[in-house]
Image (cartoon, rainbow, N blue to C red):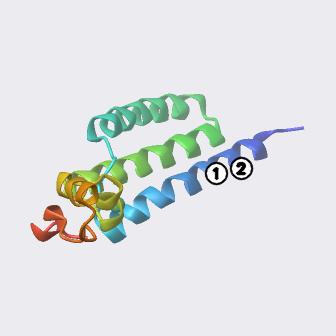
Amino acid sequence: MSLEWIGFVGTGLVVVAYLPQVIHLVRARCASGVSLRAYLVWCASAALLLTYAISTADAVFIALQAYQFMALSAIYLLAFRHRGRSCDLHCRSEPAPSDLVVAALGVGTGDADPRRLAGNPS
Ligand SMILES: [Zn+2]
């Protein structure tokens, strides 16, 4: 009995796993937390593994590595395009120094985040 279907199910899970990152990059234009260097290395790795997968003629391995290469390349290119940008959610997850001062003094709401006021798109 062939266990190839298990490989395709695993590949499907990989497809689903990348979607939240891609969707966030496209919708929010936010590259917060995406390491360009790491994704560049992963793209190179996926390209090499795809080359090897093609040489083995294994359908699951080829499908997995082809998708990995496409997803990683898309994430790298989108993150490069939107590098330095953060959405409101990610801006708020790392309190700005001014927010810490406001919180320490117990005044205001911290809405005057200088990163957002400086035109940080979100
Ligand atoms: Zn974000």
Mark nearest the camera among 2 and 1 is 1
Q: Quadrant of ligand 1?
A: bottom left
Residue 6 at x, y = what percent? 76, 43
Residue 55 at x, y = what percent? 53, 29
Q: In the image, is residue 84 above or below residue 37?
A: below
Q: Determine if the C-beta at disc 2 is less than 8 A from ligand 1.
A: no
Which mark, residue 13? 1
Which quadrant of the figure has residue 4?
top right
Identify residue type, mark 2: Val
- Secondary element at image label 1: helix
Q: In the image, is residue 43 above or below residue 81?
A: above
Q: Mark 1: few, some, or many residues within 10 Å (few <14, many ≥20)?
A: few
Q: How many marks?
A: 2
Give the side of residue 115 with respect to residue 29, left or right. left
Rendered-image quadrant of the C terminus: bottom left
The foreground one among 41 and 109 is: 109
Rendered-image quadrant of the N terminus: top right
Which quadrant of the figure has residue 113?
bottom left
Q: Determine if the C-beta at disc 1 is less than 8 A from ligand 1.
A: no
Q: Which residue lies at the image location 31% right of the left edge and 52% below the top edge?
A: 94
Residue 48 at x, y = what percent? 42, 29
The foreground one among 85 and 12 is: 85
Q: Which residue is mark 2?
A: 9
Give the side of residue 83 with respect to residue 55, left or right. left
Q: Which residue lies at the image location 39% right of the left edge and 63% below the top edge?
A: 24
- Secondary element at image label 2: helix
Q: In the image, is residue 85 above or below residue 54?
A: below
Name the residue furthest front. Answer: 105
The foreground one among 87 and 76 is: 87
Which quadrant of the figure has residue 43?
top left
